[in-house]
Image: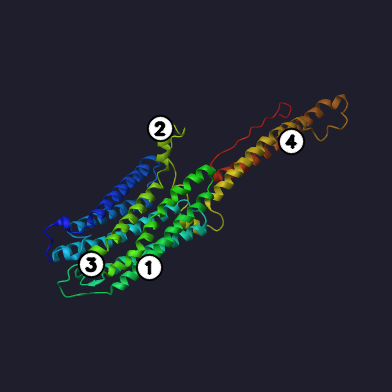
Amino acid sequence: MERSKDPSSVPNRGPELVAVNIAFMTAALIANFLRCYVRMTMVKAFGVDDWLMAVATTAFITYASFSIAGVHYGTGRHHKDLSVTDIATARNCWWYCYLFYCISMILSKVSIGCLLLRIAFRKLHVWIIYAAMFISVVAGTVFFFVTMFQCKPISFFWNKRQPGQCINMDVIIGLAYLYSTFSIISDFTFAILPGFLVWNLQLKPRTKIALIPLLTMGCIASSAVVARTPYLKNFNSPDFLWSTLDIATWSTVEQGLAITAGSLATLRPLFHLAAHKLGISTRSGTRPSNYGMGSPSASQVLSSPRKSSHAHNAMDSFKLSSVVEAQSSDEPKQEQADTTVRSPTWYQPLPKIGGLNSHRMSVQKKNKVTGDNESEKSLKAESSKESMDQDGMQIMVKKSFFITDEQR
């Protein structure tokens, strides 16, 4: 087909897709840049989830670049208004968008799952997160390879002027529906689970309420998946470049939301710093954090026979406070005991003048032995309490005791 001589009279929805690509690509870039800044310079805990999200952002940028190039050659226009060469080039860009879309979504879903694994300490929660990550990876990987090799040769997808064949497009549509279903399941899993994860953390109620929306933001991409579902049937349209524009638009929105929202969930320290600069909060939030370092790995959680390290630390802190209270309450008792300790022979009658000095010496010896025994018991109690404290919090609580001159 020959291109129309008057471009203004040709229906063209391509600029809509370009605007969506630029808007969400810019938002994803800014959010991911801020995420890297927070993790590298503020909390100093750049982890696997951050690397995955950075690679996902790169894949999304590549996807948006091919999408914009496809608009230049004909995406968003009717085939009758395009030349055969432009149709082939635009469909070639669509084929690359297939691949980079899968890469971007797989990595962003796994990154969100790894983020939740950082604060998950119950085996049930860890298994749920792994299951959601697994179905996302499997569905995305299958969709990736099926769309890559749907035609034989591969180039027959965009170049119909050569001999070849493609699988039935109904298979691609069915697979797209299946992928969307799994994506919605994993997204809603990542949406509901953070409420249970945060509520079990040792945090103030206000902090928990503030964290839950941030963590659930990583799953709002499911809204774009739901909105795209009615248009999946258009894959089978002969006017492919015009009919699939809504699919391309919502796919861009899905990736942009997943990366942007998943990155915003990690920016709480930056929000604290901004609030401090504006005078809203007295906490700067710029201290280095052990976020992602001190928490146990998922394998450690799954292999632990009884309790998680979080519960163990909570128990250790409880034991520490109990020891301190016990020691503070024992101090007056110890002082009272020191003042009331007497020799077992205090009630015996004193010997007569000749044996008075020897009796006094024996009483002082027995008092000294009694004082030494009490000192040894105190040292044993102190060492046991210190070992209990060192097990969890690495804090040593010492108690001083005194021996009077009479006991010496």
Instruction: State left or right for residue 106 relative to residue 87.
Output: right
The residue carrying pointer 4 sits among few (fewer than 14), some (14 to 19) or many (20 or more) residues within 10 Å by Cα, namely some
Between marks 4 and 2, how big is the CA–CA gap? 63 Å
Between marks 1 and 4, how big is the CA–CA gap? 81 Å
Q: Foreground mark, 4 or 2?
A: 2
Q: Which residue is mark 4?
A: 370
In the picture, the disc for residue 239 is: 3
Residue 28: horizontal and vertical position, in percent?
A: 32, 49
Q: Is residue 366 visible?
A: yes
Question: Upstream in the sequence, badge 1 or badge 3?
Answer: 1
Q: Foreground mark, 2 or 3?
A: 3
Answer whether labels 1 and 4 touch (C-beta < 8 Å): no
Q: What's the residue type where badge 2 is placed?
A: Lys
Q: Which residue is mark 2?
A: 277
Q: Quadrant of the C terminus?
A: top right
Q: What's the residue type where badge 1 is placed?
A: Leu
Q: Nearer the viewer, residue 57 or 403?
A: 57
Between marks 1 and 2, how big is the CA–CA gap? 48 Å
Which residue is located at x 41 percent, y 63 percent? 134
